[in-house]
Amino acid sequence: MAVREIVVIDHPVLRRKAKKIIKLTAEHRKLIEDMIETMRVAPGVGLAAPQVGVSERLIVVEYAEEEEDAPPKKKKLYVVINPEIVAVSEETVQGTEGCLSVPGWVGDVLRHEAIVVRGLNRNGEKIKIEADGWLARIFQHEIDHLDGVLYIDKLVSKDTLRRVQAGTEEAAEAIG
Ligand code: ZN
């Protein structure tokens, strides 16, 4: 495994529509391992292939769901190839997001409260993920990356965009 460089805002790969993966190769398997390590080191809770300069439809997400008055759950790792959002809740929620490709900033975005994602796992098997709350937000943020969309394109208002200091709790809100 190796940590890859995360590209930032003015890199054109972030604005390209990523290509569907037709056949899983050894190179993809290496990319998946590297993306997991890169996400963990960043640290972030998600990462999309374009963020490491690869314009292909692949995301990794790792997140522990939090419940009030309950001990934190174990982190769950998702690797999704060709992810597609196939259903969304009518209910939307506003939340503060950051992005590893837009370092030093956070802003508020409206997202569906719950979604259903279909795609393939790293063995090429079909999977379906039902996500709500913050996990649903992470998936929407990462899948946007595959379409060349950044959260700053979707701010509820430009006034919500603000600078954060690296290392602070707010900066740690960075999604991926
Ligand atoms: Zn991002």
Image (cartoon, helix red, strand yellow):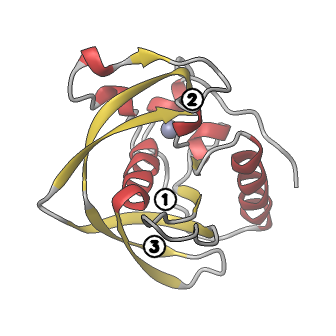
Query: Which structural element holds mark 2?
Result: helix
Q: Which residue is mark 2?
A: 171
Q: Which residue is mark 3?
A: 119
Contact, CB < 8 Å: mark 3 with mark 1? no
Q: Judge whether 168 appears above or below 116 on screen.
A: above
- Which numbered dot is residue 57? none
Q: Which residue is mark 1?
A: 20
- Mark 3 Cβ inside 8 Å of ligand 1: no
Residue 152 drawn at (x, y percent): 36, 26
Mark nearer the N terminus (2 vs 1): 1
Residue at the (29%, 36%) spot, across then down: 109
Q: Residues within 10 Å of mark 1 (few under 14, many from 20)?
A: some
Amino acid of disc 2: Ala
Mark nearer the N terminus (2 vs 3): 3
Amino acid of disc 1: Lys
Give the distance between the C-alpha atoms of the residues marked 2 and 1, in whole angstroms. 32 Å
Residue at the (36%, 65%) spot, across then down: 84
Q: Residues within 10 Å of mark 2 (few under 14, many from 20)?
A: many
Amino acid of disc 3: Gly
Q: Residue furthest bottom?
A: 125
Residue at the (44%, 64%) spot, across then down: 83
Q: Judge whether 44 appears above or below 118 on screen.
A: above
Residue at the (78%, 40%) spot, across then down: 4
Query: Which structural element holds mark 1?
Result: loop
Mark nearer the N terminus (3 vs 1): 1
Q: Quadrant of residue 112?
A: bottom left
